[in-house]
Image (spheres, rainbow, N blue to C red):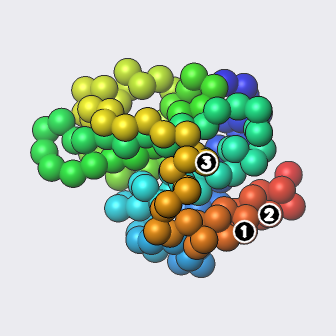
Amino acid sequence: MSEKQEVLVRHVREYMQNNRSEIDAPFFSGFPNNCCESASILLGIVLARCYPKQQVYFIKSEVIFGQGMHFWIEAGGSVYDITCDQFKSFSEPIIGGSRSELSQYFSVSEQTEIEKKLVNYDWKDRLTCAAECVYGAIRSNA
């Protein structure tokens, strides 16, 4: 996607890293560890708000060699995995990459538009509120 979008994602990631103890979202205090679902949803909400004409997808995957799940966002044909560096195989987040960078570690099991993911999501209100805080902070620093 665009360089502007990648810069936005980097700012969101930096904000999450620096403010993880203040973000009221599940498991966020250990960011980027063990919070890939909530971090991805937060990022997806911010991207959808900043790029309303673009489809933003929440990706759920299964770990190929082990147990567990992992989540990331895809938008504009690019992958935004701001928590993959919690795994030994990744030294930094994937910002504007391709799904092939993740395919040897994760098998995609579900792809859902971010708005549809939120419809019946248990943490919808908390994550939407947290996303507004992230969006506001990013906007005021732009």
Q: Position of residue 88 (x, y in %)?
A: 27, 45
Total marks shown come to 3
In three-dimensional space, the C-alpha distance between marks 1 and 3, rounded to whole angstroms, equals: 18 Å
Q: From the viewer's perspective, is residue 42 above or below residue 53?
A: below
At horizontal 27% and vertical 49% (from top left) the residue drawn is: 69
Local SS, label 1:
helix
At horizontal 70% and vertical 44% (from top left) the residue drawn is: 48
Q: From the viewer's perspective, is residue 86 above or below residue 6?
A: below
Which of label 1 and label 3 is nearer to you? 3
Residue 134's image quarter? bottom right
Disc 1 residue type? Cys
Q: In the image as oriented, which residue stretches furthest toward the front? A: 120
Disc 3 residue type? Glu
Q: In the image as oriented, which residue stretches furthest toward the left? A: 66
The crowding category of the residue bearing disc 1, from other C-alpha atoms within 10 Å (few below 14, some 14 to 19, many at least 20), is some
The crowding category of the residue bearing disc 2, from other C-alpha atoms within 10 Å (few below 14, some 14 to 19, many at least 20), is few
Q: Which residue, given by chain and number where applicable, does mark 3 sit on?
A: 115
The answer to which of marks 2 and 3 sits earlier in the sequence is 3
Q: Nearer the viewer, residue 92 or 132?
A: 132
Q: Position of residue 35 (x, y in %)?
A: 41, 61
From where the camera sits, is residue 118 visible? yes
At horizontal 55% and vertical 47% (from top left) the residue drawn is: 116
Q: Is residue 141 left or right of residue 67?
A: right
Q: Which residue, given by chain and number where applicable, does mark 1 sit on?
A: 133
Disc 2 residue type? Gly
At horizontal 55% and vertical 56% (from top left) the residue drawn is: 118
Which of label 2 and label 3 is nearer to you? 3
Q: Which residue, given by chain and number where applicable, does mark 2 sit on?
A: 136
Q: Is residue 18 left or right of residue 29?
A: right
Q: Is residue 102 left or right of residue 129?
A: left
